């Protein structure tokens, strides 16, 4: 797989963060993408920033509020639907690796909703669907770069790199670690897949290496839908852990130039996933870096 996805300098880009097995939100973003294809004469792209899989298996009466809108994990169906979408819209549908996907191809096994979510999902799927899922995950990149100034990763932009080449050379197999857990401490892969925050200095170094101005990522839950950090970072919650009213996705003009997070505007680049349920004015939150 290409570790770094390079998006073109024209067309529309829709971006969806952590779905964690929520098929309903997947279908909604696909609907929005297909509308964008119509609106932009076929020149649209859809990017998932990782953690498409591993959601809760919890009955409604036991569902805690902090998990946001109720849903039941459909990771297997979602991955197959993703593969179908990439086949239908060749070269226009992309995904980044999340820490949850990484567990299936050599990374540490996650334990959010089960003692071993990797083992659980592979047991549910069986050997042949597991092999199919792994081959899909192998196509996922570690980061996406654009010509419009935005860089996408799964986790916070804390990876210690000075060039794109360092990212392209990253090893995801875990083969040379004594334990997959060691990946958590590595300065590139560990940070990209697991970091929940980056200092201003870390973000600027990463963005300089990636030739970008603003980092957009998920991995963490922002109950308000999104958070801006300083001038260079935005965390987006499209699905997992958020109520429908606050879920947001990103829509960018790949031919534009975004210089700071201030160039990403509510109602233009930051849009509600379910406009009929969203408040008249989206909230979001911001903090200094
Ligand atoms: Mn994650």
Image: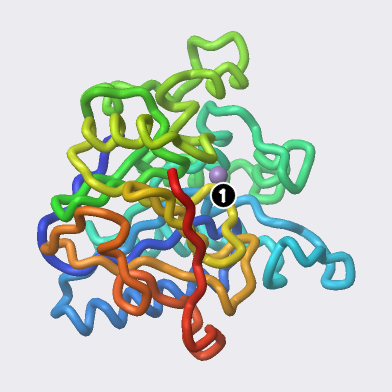
> Quadrant for ligand 1?
top right
Camera-nearest residue between 233 and 98? 233
Q: Is residue 178 left or right of residue 157?
A: right
x then y, percent, for residue 271: 40, 75
Q: Please name whichever residue, 114 or 147, is drawn nearer the observer in this view of the structure.
A: 147
x 56%, y 73%: residue = 246
Q: Position of residue 77 (x, y in %)?
A: 57, 62
Direction from residue 116 to residue 268 in the image, left or right: left
Q: Quadrant of the N terminus?
A: top left
Q: Assess mark 1: CB under 8 A from ligand 1?
A: yes
Depth check: give the residue in front, 144 or 125: 144
Q: Nearer the viewer, residue 158 or 61?
A: 158
Residue 180 is left or right of residue 226, and the answer is right
Quickly name the residue at label 1.
Answer: 220
Query: In which quadrant of the rendered view does residue 89 lie?
Result: bottom left
Residue displayed at 31% across by 57% down: 261
The residue shown at (54%, 11%) is 177
Q: Quadrant of the C terminus?
A: top left
Give the percent coordinates (x, y) of residue 194: 53, 35
Q: Position of residue 274 (x, y in %)?
A: 50, 82
Q: Please tell me whether residue 288 is drawn above or below residue 64 in the rendered image.
A: above
Q: With respect to residue 115, does 253 lie above or below?
A: below
């Amino acid at each position: 797989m290409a570790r770094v996805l390079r998006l073109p300098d024209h067309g529309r880009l829709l971006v969806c963060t952590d779905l964690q097995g929520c098929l309903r939100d997947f279908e909604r973003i696909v609907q929005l993408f297909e509308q964008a294809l119509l609106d932009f004469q076929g020149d649209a792209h859809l990017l998932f920033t990782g953690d498409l899989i591993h959601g809760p298996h919890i009955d409604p009466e036991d569902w805690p509020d902090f998990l946001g809108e109720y849903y039941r994990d459909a990771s297997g169906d979602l991955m197959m639907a993703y593969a179908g979408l990439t086949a239908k819209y060749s070269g226009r549908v992309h995904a980044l690796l999340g820490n949850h996907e990484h567990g299936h191809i050599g990374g540490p096994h996650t334990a959010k909703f089960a003692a071993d979510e990797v083992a659980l999902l592979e047991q549910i799927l069986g050997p042949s669907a597991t092999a199919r899922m792994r081959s899909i995950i192998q196509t996922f990149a570690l980061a996406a770069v654009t010509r419009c100034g935005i860089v996408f990763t799964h986790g916070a932009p804390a990876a210690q790199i000075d060039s794109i080449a360092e990212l392209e050379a990253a090893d995801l197999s875990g083969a040379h670690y004594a334990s997959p857990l060691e990946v958590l401490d590595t300065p590139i892969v560990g940070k990209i897949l697991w970091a929940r925050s980056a200092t201003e200095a870390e973000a600027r170094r990463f963005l300089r290496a990636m030739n970008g101005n603003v980092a957009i990522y998920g991995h963490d839950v922002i109950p308000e839908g999104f958070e801006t950090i300083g001038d260079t970072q935005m965390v987006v919650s499209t699905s997992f852990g958020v109520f429908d009213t606050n879920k947001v996705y990103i829509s960018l003009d790949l031919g534009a130039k975004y210089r700071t997070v201030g160039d990403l505007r509510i109602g233009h680049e930051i849009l509600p996933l379910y406009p009929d349920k969203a408040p008249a004015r989206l909230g979001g939150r911001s903090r200094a870096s």
